[in-house]
Image (cartoon, rainbow, N blue to C red):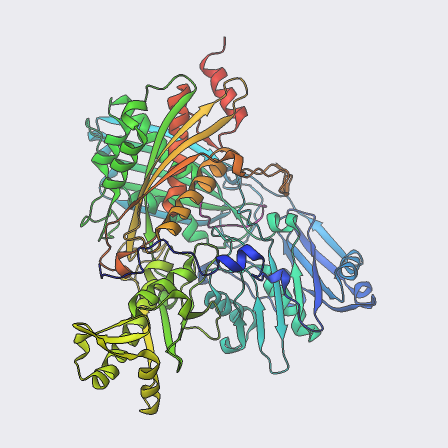
Amino acid sequence: MAEGELVGQRVVRIDSRAKATGEARYTADLTLPRMLHAKVLRSPHAHARILNIDTSKAERLPGVKAVVTGKDAAGVKWGVFRYTRDQELLPAEKVRYVGEDVAAVAALDEETALEALSLIDVEYDVLPAVFDPLEAMQEGAPQIHDHVENNVNIHVPIEVGDVDRAFQEAYLVREDRFSDTEYTYCQTEPYAVLVNYDSNGNLEIWTPNASPHTKAKALSNLLKMPLAKVKVRKISTGGAFGGRSDIFPGEFIAALLAIKAGRPVKMVYTREESFTSVRQAHSMVVDLKTGVTEDGRFLANEMKVVLDGGAYSSTGPIAVSVPFLVWEETYRLHNVRFNGYRVFTNKPVRGMYRCHGRSFMGGLGMQLDMIAEELSIDPAEIRLRNALRTGETQVTGSRIISCGLTEAIEKATETSGWKEKRGKLPYSRGIGMGASGMMVGFPMGIRGGSAALLKFNEDGGCTLISGVVDNGQGNESMVVQIAADVLGMKMEDINLVSSDSEITPLDQGAYSQASTFVSGNAARGAAVDAREQILNIASDMLDATPGELDLKDGQVFVKHRPEWNVWLGKVIRKALLDNTPVVGRGSYMPKVDLRREWVSNPKGQHAGTFSFGAVVAEVEVDTETGQVRVTNVTGAHDCGFAINPMAVEGQLEGSVASGGVGASLLEEHSWDGGQMLNATMLEYKVPLSVDMPQITPIIVETVDPEGPFGAKEAGLAGSMNMFQAVGNAIYDALGVWIKEFPITPDKVLQALEEKDPES
C-alpha cells in the first residue's frame, strides 16, 4: 500500500453539510421556467388488452398542454440486454400488471393534470391473470408474453463436475426448501423526473439514478435520438439500494411529454406509485440439496430457484444469477448444479436489490448450520473448513486475488464471544452467524470501466471530473479523498464535477459494487498523472530530478531540503505559459472475461476482485407474541483497505438495518390478486432507530493488488450475511427452523406450536 497522510483517515464526507442543512437539491426541488406538471393514468387490471383510448376530452381541458399514449411511443421496448427487450414503457396493446402506465398528461399544475386523467376513457378486454410463479410455469397457465413458453422469462443453467456421483459419495445429504415474499426498496425520496427539451433538440434529464451514462444510452435508443443530445444531469439522490439501476417508464414518458409540449415537464410519483410502479425485489422459492464429507466439506451442491419476476424482464439474467454467484464466491465448491428460473407473473416488475435473495442466501446459510448440527461441528468451524482463500479459483472459473474471509469469520466469532454463547444462552435468546463474498466490478462491456480527468487552475486549486455516482454511499467523497492524498492537497481544495453524462467521462455507475475499485482507480490514475506532470515541470524550477521532489500543502519541495520549494500555483502558471497545461488522465477497467455472459456462458473471470464478510447476530424472542428482536451484531468485512474507515463502518451498519432487521424480520408485501395492499410507509414495515441493535463493526484489510491503495467493495455482503445470521440465531434461541422470510411473529408462533402442540 502506498503511504499517504489522508487515505485511511476518518474524514467528514464532502456532502455532509449540504445534506444536513437541506441545501442539497433533489429532483422534486427543481423548477424551470414554463415548467409543466405530469401525471400518469394507470391500469386497474392485472392483465388486459387495450382496445381503445380516447383522450379527446382531456386534450380540450384548459391548462392541458400535452397528452401521450402508446401511440406516441413508436413501439420501442426496453430490456437491459438485447434478448430481454420486452417492455413497452408506454404500452399500446396490452397491460400486464395493476399500476402499469397507460397514458400521461402534462398540464400547468398537478390539479389540472389529475382532472385530465379522469377524462381519459380506456376500453379494456380483461384477460386471465396469474400471480404465483410456480403456477405460472404450469401448462395451461395464462400466457403473459407470446415469445416465451410457460412464462419462463430466463433460465440460467450452470453445471460443473459430476454432481450425481458426488452425491452418491457424500457422507451426508440434506434437502430443504426456503421461500420469501416480495419486498420494496423504500428509498426516502419518492421517484421523480424533470425533463427539458430545447429548440436545438437537446434533452436534459434530472432523476435519481445509479448511472447517468447507462441511462443516457438507454434513453437515446428508446427515443431514437443521438447520444450527444441526451444529457442526464447531476442530482442528489435519496437512496438507491439497487432500485435506481434500471430504466423506468417515468423518464421515458416525461421525455415524450416535454418533446410534444415543447416545455419542461416534471413528474413526481406519490408514495404509492413509488411502491407499485418503479421496481420491487423478487420473491423466491428455493430448493437446496447439499452433500458433504464426514468432516463437513462440500462435495455436491444442487440448487433450484424460482423467482417471481413480475411482468417484464428488467435485470432478469443478473437477478437470477447473483445469489448463486455470491455462494460460489464464498466457499470451495467442486460439483455444482444450478437451475435458476425467472418467471413472468401479472405483478409489478422486479429488479436487483442490496438485499437480493434472502431465501436463497439465508437458506444456504441456515442449511449449512443444519448440516453442522447433524455432524456435531461448530457452525463457525464448518465455514472455515470450506472458505475460499487467496489464490484459489471459484467453481465457474474466477480467481481470488485477495481474500479475508477466514480472518473475518475468526474476528467476528472472537469479538462476539461466539464460543461462550452458541448453544449456551437461556431459552428464547440465541446467536447465529452468516458469511459470504461479493463480486466487485462484473462484466458490463464498455460501460464496465471508468475514466477521470483532473485539471488545475492558476491558483493551484484543481477540479476532478468523474462520472462516479453517489446515492448515499460516500462515493464522491471517496474519489476526492484519493485524489487529495496523491496530490498532497486538502480535500476542500479539490472541486468535484460528477454524475453528468455530458460533462464527465464514461463510468459504470453505482452498481456492480465497483465505485471504489473502478472509479477510485480512475481518480487515482488521474491524480498520479497530474502529479508526475507537476513534478517534471517543477524539477527545472528547483534544479532537481522529479524523483527528488514531493508535493504537499500546495508546495513542491526537495525531499532532503524542504526549504527549497516552489508554490504549486507558480508551477501551474509556468505550465500554462509553456503551453503544457497540467491535465491528469486516469482510467480503469476491471480484469474480467468479456466472453462471460449471464445465461449463454456463465464461466470465466466474473469480477475484477471479491470482497468478503462475516456477521454474528444475537436475538431475543418473545415466545408469547412471537416478536424477534436483534440485540447485538458483530460484523467483520474484508474491504481490502478502508479509504475512509468511518464510511466503511456506516455501510456495515446499514447492512444490519436493511438485511438484518428489515429484510429478515419485517419487510413484505400483501396482495389481493395483483393489487398491492400495503403500498404506503404506514403499512409497509421498515426498521426504525428504536429497532436497531448494538453494532460492532470490524474492518479487515487484505490490501487488494488491483484496488486503489488496496481498496475494494465495502458493506454489501453484510446484508446477505444478516439473513443467515438472524435465521440461525432464532434456531439457537428456540430450537425451530423457520424457512420463510421475513420471519414475522405469526411464523414464529406457528413454528412453536408445531414443535410443541401442548404448550
Asked if the stretch drawn in magenta spans residue 354, the answer is yes
Q: Is residue 668 left or right of residue 294?
A: right
Q: What span is in magenta?
A: 346-357
Using the rendered view, name the quadrant where residue 123 is placed.
bottom right
Using the rendered view, name the quadrant where residue 300 is placed.
top left
Could you say where residue 304 lies in the image, as x and y percent from the top left? 38, 39
Our reading of the magenta stretch's main secondary structure is: loop
> Is the residue 525 above or below the residue 80 in the image?
below
Q: Is residue 335 visible?
A: no
Residues 613 and 216: in front is 613
Query: In percent of the image, x 26 and y 56: which residue is there?
Result: 604
Residues 98 and 128: in front is 98
Residues 451 and 98: in front is 451
Query: In percent of the image, x 59 and y 66: which residue is there?
Result: 75
Q: Is residue 668 left or right of residue 489?
A: right
Could you say where residue 411 lies in the image, as x and y percent from the top left? 26, 37
Q: Is residue 302 visible?
A: yes
